[in-house]
Image (cartoon, helix red, strand yellow):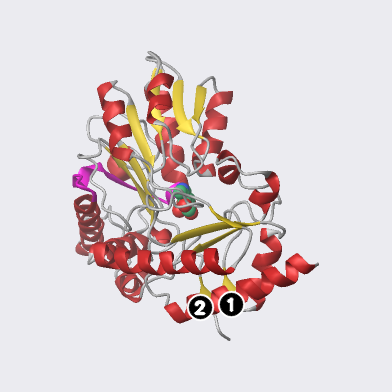
């Protein structure tokens, strides 16, 4: 059956070279990286090589990369450990209303533990206000956590400015770059990023692997206690196949990133243009240009996002309403509400996230299907 995959913000297809890079570590290269004989040391080499590749991709050093089980774990670790490490200075954290739940729910937990959280507003395009950020800073502010790019609406935040403000004020800066890493160039030095979260499966890598970049000199506590893996900060035998797969995904993403992004942005803008021209009562969510190359998000009045999604699925098209984490629960997306959308606009939203493999023909079929579905739903 025909399948058009337009949900790359939820997860991506594992690239063939990723699978190939993993295979040896799922079979004959099964050594424990902590073991001293050569079967072990070759696994260790693979782990260190992967750290070098990843570090080079973000302008970091090998020893600043810590493998985790994914983006959620990296976000949890960064926030909880920063709160603990800086408790002597203060307990105030600044974040935004549009973060992923991995950050928002961790903040809620930290609030119960005695932290104070400021949630910055965003404008109608999803951008944080730099002046509001400056005004929110207090002597006891220990951490600013602002996502690089939003997973629902694709808006890219002014990370360089935020990093400079954090540095100027001596405050740690963490960014959830799960959606941005591999799509847009990131240099942790130029952007003054102290901690950065990323995930394999959002960039054609395997599920269950990701990393946290921690700038050297920042004394974050351990996430897991046990063995000496990850410089004593995250114990447990390394996910060697996942790490090898993540390295292959990073290598693949870095190669010709700009051309791929340009091609994807063109497809994105084609889809946006056709929807805006051909479907009445729609609104593009997110910033028009400061936007991830593959992200399209629309609100359609007089239709439920969930109903559109189900009817699109019957036509073989995978899309999402709101975010994957909130579909199933019928709460309107916190991101869309933060943009100032009314409840019914937020409920009628659809996210279509492309990859560089999508074709114009697929998008044409998608628009035709969407037109037909909306006509049917709106006539009810
Ligand atoms: C997917 C996602 C996460 C969670 O990553 P996992 O690897 O699935 O745990 C965190 N933040 C953002 C912005 C995401 O899109």
Q: Which of 305 and 86 is in front in this view?
A: 305
Occupied quadrant, residue 340: top right
Q: Please, is residue 308 above or below residue 127 in the view? A: below
Q: Name the residue under label 1.
A: 368
Residue 72: image location, x then y, percent: 47, 46
Q: Name the residue under label 2.
A: 364
Q: From which residue to which does the magenta span run?
A: 58-71
Residue 120: image location, x then y, percent: 48, 30
Which residue lies most toward the right here? Answer: 380
For numbered disc 1, what is the local secondary structure? helix
Residue 218, labelled with which disc?
Answer: none
**Quadrant of image for the C terminus:** bottom right
Instruction: Tell me which residue sits at (55%, 73%) in the image.
Output: 367
**Quadrant of image for the N terminus:** bottom right
Occupied quadrant, residue 47: bottom left
Kindly check if marks 2 and 1 are in contact, taking CB atoms under 8 A apart as contact.
yes
**Magenta stretch: includes residue 278:** no
């Amino acid at each position: 059956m025909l399948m058009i995959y337009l949900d790359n913000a939820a997860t991506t297809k594992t690239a063939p070279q990723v699978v190939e890079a993993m295979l040896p570590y799922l079979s004959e290269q099964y050594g424990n990286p902590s073991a001293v004989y050569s079967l072990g040391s070759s696994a260790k080499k693979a782990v260190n090589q992967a750290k070098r590749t990843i570090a080079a991709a973000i302008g970091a050093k090998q020893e600043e990369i810590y493998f985790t089980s994914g983006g959620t774990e990296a976000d949890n670790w960064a926030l909880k450990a920063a709160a603990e490490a800086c408790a002597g200075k203060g307990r105030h954290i600044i974040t935004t209303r549009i973060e992923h739940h991995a950050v928002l729910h961790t903040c809620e937990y930290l609030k119960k533990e005695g932290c104070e959280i400021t949630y910055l507003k965003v404008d109608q395009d999803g951008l944080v206000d730099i002046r509001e950020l400056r005004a929110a800073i207090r002597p006891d502010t220990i951490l600013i956590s602002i996502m690089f790019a939003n997973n629902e609406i694709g808006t890219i935040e002014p990370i360089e400015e935020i990093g400079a403000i954090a540095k100027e004020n001596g405050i740690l800066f963490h960014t959830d770059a799960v959606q941005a890493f591999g799509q847009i160039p990131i240099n942790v030095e130029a952007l003054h990023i102290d901690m950065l979260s990323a995930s394999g499966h959002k960039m054609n890598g395997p599920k269950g692997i990701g990393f946290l970049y921690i700038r050297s000199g920042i004394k974050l506590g351990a996430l897991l206690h046990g063995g000496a893996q990850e410089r004593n900060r995250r114990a447990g035998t390394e996910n060697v196949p996942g790490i090898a797969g993540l390295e292959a995904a990073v290598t693949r993403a870095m190669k010709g990133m700009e051309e791929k992004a340009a091609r994807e942005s063109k497809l994105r803008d084609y889809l946006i243009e056709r929807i805006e021209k051909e479907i009445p009562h729609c609104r593009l969510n997110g910033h028009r240009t400061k936007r991830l190359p593959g992200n399209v998000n629309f609100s359609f009045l007089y239709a439920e996002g969930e109903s559109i999604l189900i009817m699109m699925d019957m036509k073989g098209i995978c899309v999402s309403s709101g975010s994957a984490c909130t579909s199933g629960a019928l709460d309107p997306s916190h991101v869309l509400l933060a943009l100032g959308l009314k409840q019914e606009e937020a409920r009628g939203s659809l996210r279509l996230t492309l990859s560089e493999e999508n074709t114009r023909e697929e998008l044409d079929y998608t628009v035709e299907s969407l037109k037909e579905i909306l006509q049917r739903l709106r006539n009810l």
